[in-house]
Image (cartoon, grey):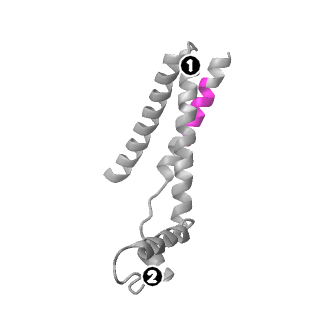
């Protein structure tokens, strides 16, 4: 339970930090209303968290496993050891070893959707 809560708190803190950074940047360069700046900050935080959550989700299903195996082979090929390709893993062994490390992107996706929903509310308030 603590681990799940810490993930949600980390996502919320990241969203708040990104939103505050965008608001601070816009405050120094533009004299828009505060509601518009918060809308921009929430939208940027939401898009970043949704994008990162989507990348983690694709990675959980093995979307980047072949790319990781290619990098593994390249590093093995360019290493200075004598046993460059003799002790390497096959693709199946690589997938079995690296396939067990999955992280749930649910907190990033939900926090990203919440930030975009908050941005749409602030946009509605800004347009009134």
Report which residue position mark 2 lands on: 93
Q: Is residue 119 magenta?
A: yes
Mark 2 and mark 1 lie on one chain; the one further toward the N terminus is: 1
Q: Which residues are magenta?
A: 113-122
Left or right side of 2 for 53: right
Identity of the residue drawn at 56% across and 35% down: 44
Magenta segment: does it hold 75?
no
Res. 99 in view: no
Query: Which type of secondary structure does the marked residue at label 1 adopt?
Result: helix
Q: What mark, if any, has residue 35 been given in the picture?
A: 1
Residue sitting at 49 percent across and 72 percent down? 69
SS at mark 2? Answer: helix
Residue at x-position 35% and y-position 74%: 80
Q: Position of residue 95 (x, y in %)?
A: 48, 76
Where in the figure is residue 52, as x and y percent of width and height?
52, 49
Badge number at residue 98: none
Label 2, residues with CA under 10 Å away: few <14, some 14-19, many ≥20:
few
Q: Is residue 77 above or below residue 59?
A: below
Q: Between 15 and 84, which is closer to the camera in this rendering?
A: 84
Compared to residue 4, the image places residue 91 above or below, namely below
Residue 89 at x, y percent in the picture? 43, 82
Does 8 appear above or below 68?
above
């Amino acid at each position: 339970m603590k681990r799940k809560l810490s993930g949600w708190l980390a996502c919320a803190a990241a969203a708040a930090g990104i939103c505050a950074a965008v608001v601070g940047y816009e405050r120094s360069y533009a004299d828009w209303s505060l509601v518009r700046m918060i809308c921009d900050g929430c939208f940027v935080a939401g898009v970043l968290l949704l994008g990162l959550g989507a990348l983690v989700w694709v990675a959980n299903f093995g979307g980047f496993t072949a790319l990781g195996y290619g990098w593994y082979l390249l590093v093995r090929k360019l290493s200075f050891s004598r046993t460059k390709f003799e002790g390497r893993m096959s693709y199946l062994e690589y997938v079995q070893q690296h396939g067990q490390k999955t992280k749930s992107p649910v907190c990033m996706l939900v926090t990203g959707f919440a930030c975009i929903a908050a941005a749409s509310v602030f946009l509605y308030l800004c347009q009134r």
